[in-house]
Amino acid sequence: MPERSDLDDLIRDYAKRLAREIQAMLPRQPTEAEFRQRVDRLLEEFCEKAGLNPLSRLEYTLASGRADAIFNRLIVEYKQPGKLSDRLSHRATREAVEQVKRYLTDLARQSRLEKARLAGIVTDGLYIIFVRYLGGSAREEGPVKVGPESLEKMLHWLAGLASGKPLTAENLNEDFSIEQLRTQNILRAMMEGLSRSLRETPHGMVARLFEQWRLFFSESIDYAEAFGGRKLEPLKKWTRRAGLTIHTPEEAERFFFVLHTYFALLVKLLAWLALSRHMAVRLGAPAFGELQTADSETLRRRLGEMESGGIFRAYGIANLLEGDFFAWYLYAWNDRIESALRELLDRLDKYDPATLALIPEETRDLFKQLYHYLLPREIRHNLGEYYTPDWLAQRLLNQVDPEFFTADPERNGSALRRKLLTQRWLDPACGSGTFLVLLIRRMRQLGEALMVPERDLLQAILRNVVGFDLNPLAVLTARVNYLLAIADLLEHRTIEITIPIYLADSIRMPSLGKELRTAGAYEFPTAVGDFLVPAAVCDSRERFDRFCRVLEESVQAGLSVESLIDRVRSFAPKAEESRLRELYEQFLELHRRGLDGLWARLLQNNFAPLVAGPFDCIVGNPPWINWEHLPDQYRSELQTLWREMQAGGPVYLGKKWDISLLMAQVVMTHLLKPGGRLGFVITQSAFKTNLGGRDFRKFRLPDQTPVRVLHVDDMVSLQPFEGASNRTAVMVLEKGKATRYPVPYTLWRKVRGKRFTYNSTLDEVMRATRRFNFYAEPVDPSDPTSPWLTARPKALKAIRKALGNSDYEAHEGVNTGGANAVYWVDIVYKRPDGLVVVRNITEGAKVKVEEVTEPIEGDLLYPLLRGRDVQRWKAEPSARIIMT
């Protein structure tokens, strides 16, 4: 099969030939048989030239009739020219479409294939209709007029269904989940290689990269803590399925390093595969297919080029990989790792990324589900990892800009075209890229409908769809998801491109120092401490990028401090020498510790929030982390920032305050245009709790800019996050207008007997739910920051009449101040002398406490009723609490 660029040229050529052949036939009013014969001849010729080697079956008998032609998984049904109409409601046209559907069902049954892997077309030379199954139901496209464009689409379908395996989330799960032998082989090989390297060369490169990984992830996840005590048991059980044995939290930490490496490797290789199929021949860049036949030395060298980012720069992408800690396997290379890698490469080479264009609905976050399959729900929840369902993300996008996502391009062409080319979107906590990919999909749909040139569409996407995240693995995954969504547009680029997804903190953005120690410098917080960068090199993106390159090159070359200062002064003469000296010595110390190769590029990424904005729309699902669960240092820094974000009045920093609210305040202040909109998946507690959301409900930014609440979706009863009992809401805010009460507030409820899943579409969820159009207003009319009262308009008036002072005074209950592991206990047994032997509960504790078993007085123990112990009509304490 030719490379993708050659195949595209061949498809365009044969689409034109088919169009000429059909146009020449039609005036003579050919019979159906003559029409079919001449088109089949050209289709078979195309398949031969394309090297598709399809299993072509002409007049093939199926259970419900005889199909005119089948080319592997594509059914082609011909009709007498002039028989079809431009309307699907036309009787003969509808009958023809239903006939193709029956043939697809029959072929799926006979071939033992899912219907989603088949497709069909019906044509009479004047019109053509495309038919396929998605999500269990048939989808029809057309009728459209037969011409070079529609025939080109038909040939793309034929090529996609006659060649490689479709690149879908389901197929990736099938081939690369932990149940697969190839996955188990590579995990075992890497685990053994890692253990051997750490044991034999404890100060070698593998150990250094492992330490870098631990530094980066320690702020968000402490794996050793997350799998201490009883939480280690489900992980042990799961890893045994891969032939691995985990005994300690430290081994659990190594397992996650290996798992992240495997996942990252799959993501990188799929990016190379996609670029290779689309652009390799045209650019003369290394083709993915060469890896399978490469000798050991060449394979290792090519993978090294990939890990350093060189392969992707050869394809014109500057930042897909910027050097990371997941290249460690190259330093632990052995025969077993090589053999397992070759299994992986062999399977990946059977995929055809072109199927993303064949099935646009699959242009989504491909890797989210794969990660779900690599780690079961219980383990992901122990880590606090939750992924936004596509349907929920789509609902939020629809609410933020209904016109952009739901308007008809034929009726609203000029407005949609303007938005497509100029409206800028940011996801400040993008994760693996769910919101970004859905945005790109809609932009591509509009681009095709409005006939926007591919070059202009590509530039609009790269300029207007931006993401930030703090998790390096998420950033890598999001970049590759982004790349796959635009891969077939890359041939239209004019310069080297940067995927606009950055490893950056959307809350603690770099800022000019305000104290004596930091004056005249920007503070860049990182996992290895704060870097103070002279303000003189931060006054433009170009100057800062050059500074970071010089910094990295100087460290690698071992240049002196004076040499570095001279180089920087050549393009930033006002840069303060003492600042440059301090920063460079920090980098040299990291180099001596073996913790370099990443920090200069990290500075470049961290700079993005300063220059990437402003944005028309900010969307996403920010992290929901309670104040009490933040690392001490981070919490201290955020306390100052939170006070800065409040627009006067008292500030409450309680333990249930959530940093998602702070992110909303920060990005609206610094990155959102006046009149712009923010849409976040947020905790419903922001609107319903008394103190936790009170500051947020001022709906005013530090400079007194008002914020208007446009709409809130209350999805608490839906529980949209897989297996998680959290209080989910979707809010849409507008910067620059004051909130007016009552606020539209939609309450979602499940329909009895209907169900939906994490992977359902938004339409399927809408059919399985009811939505009640409520309104919300502060419970205390004299205090706009008080919790919201939500009901129908008439009910709100009735409730107002019943409100007043209550004789009941609510209390918090028992608060250990974060020391649950000290005061929460299980009873082991009761001694004859009346003492009770207890063991403290350390599982899930945020503060590390040694597990002990000791006798205490029984009258100090009281029943402990936790949230998990309360069910409908039932509440049973599961433990005891010491009340001294």
Image (spheres, grey):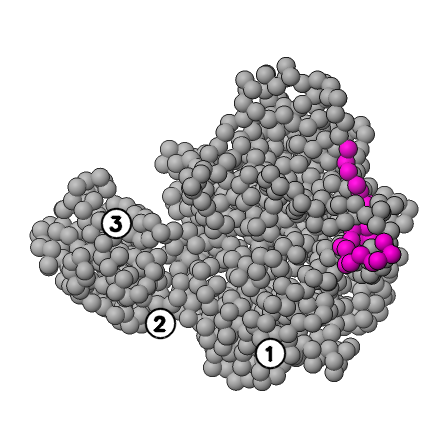
Distance in Å between CA atoms under marks 3 and 2:
27 Å
Residue 233 in the image, given as x and y percentages of width and height: 65, 65
Q: Which of the 4 image quarters holds residue 162?
A: bottom left
Which residue is drawn at the image coordinates 34% and 60% (left, top)? 114
Chain-order first, disc 3 or disc 2: 2
Residue assigned mark 1: 189
Distance in Å between CA atoms under marks 3 and 1:
50 Å
The answer to whether 142 appears left or right of 788 in the picture is: left
Label of residue 1 in the image: 2
Query: Which region is colored magenta?
Result: 811-834
Label of residue 552 in the image: none
Q: Secondary structure at mark 3?
A: strand
- Compared with 630, 420 (above or below) is above
Chain-order first, disc 3 or disc 1: 3
**What amino acid type should be assigned to the residue bearing mark 2?**
Met
Can you name the residue that lies furthest to the top here? Answer: 801
The answer to whether 344 appears left or right of 682 in the picture is: left
Q: Quadrant of the C terminus?
A: top right
Whether residue 182 is visible: yes
Q: Secondary structure at mark 2?
A: loop
**What amino acid type should be assigned to the residue bearing mark 1?**
Ala
Specify few, some or many for label 2: CA neighbours under 10 Å numbering under 14, 14-19, or 20 or more: some
User: Of tags 3 and 2, which is closer to the observer?
Assistant: 3
Chain-order first, disc 1 or disc 2: 2
Which residue is drawn at the image coordinates 63% and 55% (left, top)? 381
Front-lying residue, 422 or 201: 201
Residue assigned mark 3: 129
Residue 822 belongs to magenta span = yes
